Amino acid sequence: MLTRRGWLALGVTLAAMVLARPAPAQELDISGVWEGEITLPGTALPIEVLFEREGDGWGASMTIAVQGLIGRKLTGVSLDGRSIGFVLPGIPGDPTFTGEVEQDASRMGGAFTQGALNATWFLEPTGVRGEALAAELDEFAEWFEGARQAWDVPGASVCVVRGGEIIFSRGFGQRDREGGLEATEDTLFAIGSCSKAFTTMLLAQLVESGEITWDDRVQEHLPEFALEEPERASAMTIRDLVTHRSGLPRHDLAWYGNEGASRDELLAMMARHKATAGLRSVWQYNNLMFMVAGMVVERVTGESWESNVQSRILAPLGMDRSTMSIGALTADADHARAYFEVDDEVRLIDYRPITAVGPAGSINSSATEMGAWLIAQLGASGANGEQIIGDSGLTEMHKAQMIMSSADAGGLITSLGYGLGWMVDIYRGNLRVSHGGGIDGFSSLVTLIPGEQLGIVILTNSNSGLPGVAMQHVLDRMLGLEEQDWSAQALASMAKVKDLQAKSDEALEATRAGDAPPSRPLEAFSGRYEHPGYGVIEVELDGDTLVAHVNKMEAPLEHWHYDVFRFGDSDDRVLRHQLVQFVTAFDGTVRGVRWQVEPSVEAVVFERRSGVTLDAKALAGYVGTYRFEIGQEVTLEVRGERLVASIPGQPVFELTPVEADLFEIKGMSGFRVRFERGDGENVETAVFMQPNGVFRAEREGAVEAP
């Protein structure tokens, strides 16, 4: 029997044994990016794996770039002590990896099997670790707030996803400066051209379902699609529409501010837009082509583009608050207001409705909801477990399709080209897929690093370069790269640009003729001017100042010299400080406004229109036969609602009313007809005013006034 002393001795011995026992081995931390290879007979296949914590276990995704496999989610990931295993799903033969991790987590490797194939594999960490990234994101948030203030951006939201989950989502500054309302990760912002990838996603889904192919001719689905060159329109494919290789530059004035226009009307206007390059020969950004792509979606599905985005993308991804109109944006309690810098002052401006070209840029969303979009673009499932597109569709969208030029940022960025609604480049050794968005008062940027299952979105409520520099800053941190002071570099460049612009303005001012008043009173320039490809310019005299209304935009017209005027200060950046010239007919009347609408295309003339409309009854008052002094006859008659003139041996000419008793001869610049009435108010004479003279023709026979 043990004595009390014995029990105590035994207790001491047991305690000593417990204290001397080795502590349980701490679980290895394999989080982060690992690179290595599968060693196959006669070759080696480079691989990259991203390991992430998932609850109490591990998740992972693999990239095999040479085989076009990017960020494929691995299954069966297990780490038991130093033993590790995982499976690459969706590949014949069920590629399986088993092996061990070195005690210091400096290497892992082991056996690889795929069907009857046996090989080996290994991975080594790149130094990009999970804990370090968390700290980097906190430091990034501090940096971003300082950069936001330096760029004088009122508000912003940022979201970062990695390995299929959101790891950072935060608001900065104010969504409404005047109201003192803070921006949050859930604040809605306009994302502008980042919407383009939503349109290509819809197209990719239709390709996946076999309803279209990327290389279908546009006219197969949209027969009314027309361009100035019919052969260009007939050859254009869906792929051409969404890779900016149509050969047409922007022609944005057709839709910008043209809030009342429908997609069908804008489509018709495109037939009057000039091309500047051959089809598929040069990359030229064109928003209208994305509108056409959206119309293809509508025609194939029988539903509007908006309905398709809602049902095929937003709903499956749980993006319940994202919208496609300004009305829906402002109806949400947490939305950002729009700001624009003018003369070094950030001003609150009105929203820019762009419903007609919605497929090119009308979506509004939050950082958090865009996180779901990023995850989907990286190949993960949506909120309801549905994957909205397959791997082949993502690969096609993210693949460079058309060469484009870009700045190389000191050799750190190499452009690969434009994909399907995405720009593709190599950012400091990493494949990057991205797209920016800018519409009045908002700038945004969406970026994917598929090889690391990394996605970032930056949304702001002003037009600035902040999203671009912030994106590169956070990428450097996330990728473990040597940091560059992108913001300071960009601010310095911007200061130089402003200085250059000031010098340019001074040089332009020096070209003004000193004493060159307009050729006629300002009131003579008032009127309505139209161009079939760009819309309407309304000019009115307000006191002693001409004011121009271009579509739904407005700006004062300041006299420059002679009959040249300049659009004055305006929140509408398309108008601000551009020169226009009033042009006259041979008789001295103001007949049009000449404007270099598209920089790469010859200036166009908006022709003056009276706004006068005459019905068939009123036109009947001009009907009859008129005889010139030399005996030649001209016959006027009404066809439908048009007055036409016929001269033996010549084509039939249409007469368009300009004002009371004054008509233009359609398609013949400088040719007009003025009718003179007698005492009885009946038309007696037709005066043909032409560049080579004025010719009178007397009406034959007595005609009663209608």
Image (cartoon, grey):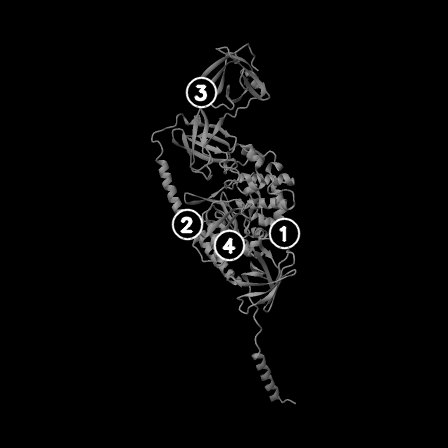
Q: CA distance from mark 3 to mark 4?
A: 65 Å
Q: Nearer the viewer, mark 3 or mark 4?
A: 4
Q: Earlier in the sequence, mark 1 or mark 3?
A: 1
Q: Earlier in the sequence, mark 1 or mark 2?
A: 1
Q: Type of residue at label 2?
A: Leu
**What is the x, y in percent for residue 110?**
59, 65
What residue is pinned by disc 3? 691
- Most foreground residue, 180 or 660: 660
Q: Earlier in the sequence, mark 4 or mark 2?
A: 4
Q: Type of residue at label 1?
A: Gln
**What is the x, y in percent for residue 263?**
57, 36
Assess disc 4: are there few (<14), some (14-19) or many (≥20) residues with their C-alpha within 10 Å of its C-alpha.
some
**What is the x, y in percent for residue 330?**
55, 44
Q: Type of residue at label 4?
A: Asn
The N terminus lies in quadrant: bottom right
Q: Earlier in the sequence, mark 4 or mark 1?
A: 1
Assess disc 3: are there few (<14), some (14-19) or many (≥20) residues with their C-alpha within 10 Å of its C-alpha.
few
What residue is pinned by disc 2? 491
At horizontal 62% and vertical 37% (from top left) the residue drawn is: 220
